Amino acid sequence: MKEKINQILENAKEEIPACQDLDKLEDLRIKFTGKKSKLHSLLSKIGELPAERRPEIGKALNITKNKINKLLSDKKEELEKISQRKSAQESKIDITMTGRQISLGAKHPLYQIWEEIEDIFIRLGFEIAEGPDIETEYYNFDALNTPEDHPARNLQDTFYLKNGNLLRTQTSPVQIRVMENHSPPIRIISPGRCYRNDKVDASHSPVFHQVEALVVDEDITFPDLKGTLDSFVKRLFGPKIRSRFRPHFFPFTEPSAEMDILCVNCNGKGCKLCKNSGWLEMGGAGMVDPAVFKNVGYDPEKYTGFAFGLGIDRITMLKYGISDMRLLFQNDLRILKQFS
Ligand code: DAH
């Protein structure tokens, strides 16, 4: 009997480790430990043995059964690992590879300032208006009282598209679209992308960003314009910032002005940033020209209004001390990561 038991173990030791496939291993499990296995039939015959031999044979059978089970479970583990590795290879996923750290994105500095500008004006009671990047000559120039021979209409300055369309050179056409669709009182800002046929350098880009503002009501005056802009720059750059207005010309405002703020770098003493003038140009402004009101069907005797347009790129550069505009458009992660 003992010999038979030994023989079973020997067979198992030979066949189980040689097995290469999980299905065949299952067959071997049934063969060596199943109900119809030799081991099982020996176990069931223990009762027929003389009583004094039963413990010894019983023990030998149990040990053998445990050894065979161990052989089976070791082999099963080995084959399962191989099969996992194979399927991972087939799906080209290396489950043994360590994970990669996921880096979180951040808002682009330009967009951070864009939102800050929106917040300031919303708190001042303005609403946000939007207009298309692709405009018609009418909205970008004619309705804004810009004469046929104005230099801005030149091919060198404006990207013209087919069918008389163009890429807007300013956010001012949004003024017209808003007035065409609403009656006064109006108080909107419109941040957005603009396009000009400029060569790229440290302070020019063919794509840039402006924020337009338009306020129309009865009795709107130039001091309202000054007060609004001054309050805006103080909220943006701090309460010590002073602003000034210089006379200028824009076709769609009369009178027109350009606004400067005291240099944020040198506080007016004169430095490289302000080209020793102590002041930084912020953008154009003025009282809406009656001719523009006529174009949208407003009564210029009844309504007055102011408008202005500021460069968001320039404001971003001043706020963050960025000296080269190209850095805003190259999307170099080394730069962008500093703003997260
Ligand atoms: N659109 C002008 C520009 O791009 C800026 C501007 C000036 C906007 C005066 C205005 C304004 O609304 O009143 O240079």
Image: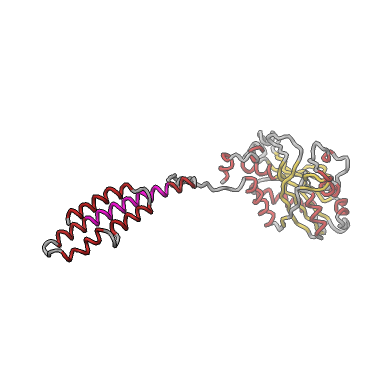
Q: Is residue 232 magenta?
A: no
Tell me where residue 64 appears, x and y as whole percent.
22, 55
| Nearer to me, 114 or 83 | 83
**Which of the 4 image quarters holds residue 326?**
top right
Q: Is residue 74 magenta?
A: yes
State which region is magenta: 64-85
Give the residue at the far left of this rendering.
52
Is residue 77 shown left or right of residue 8?
Answer: right
In the rendering, at what x and y percent does residue 96 appear?
A: 42, 45
Marks counted in the figure total 0
What is the quadrant of residue 2 in the picture? bottom left
Q: Nearer the viewer, residue 216 or 102?
A: 102
Question: To which quarter of the image does residue 156 belong?
Answer: top right
Instruction: Answer whether residue 85 is visible to the viewer in this image.
Output: yes
Tell me where residue 69 appears, x and y as whole percent: 28, 55
Q: Is residue 255 something that shows in the picture?
A: no
Task: Name the residue: 60% across, 39% down.
Answer: 332
Front position in the image: 68 or 144: 68
Q: Residue at x 69, y 50 (%)?
A: 232
> Which residue shows up at 56% across the image and 46% down it?
340
- Residue at 58% x, 48% y is 106
| Residue 98, image x, y percentages | 44, 45
Q: Main secondary structure of the magenta part?
A: helix
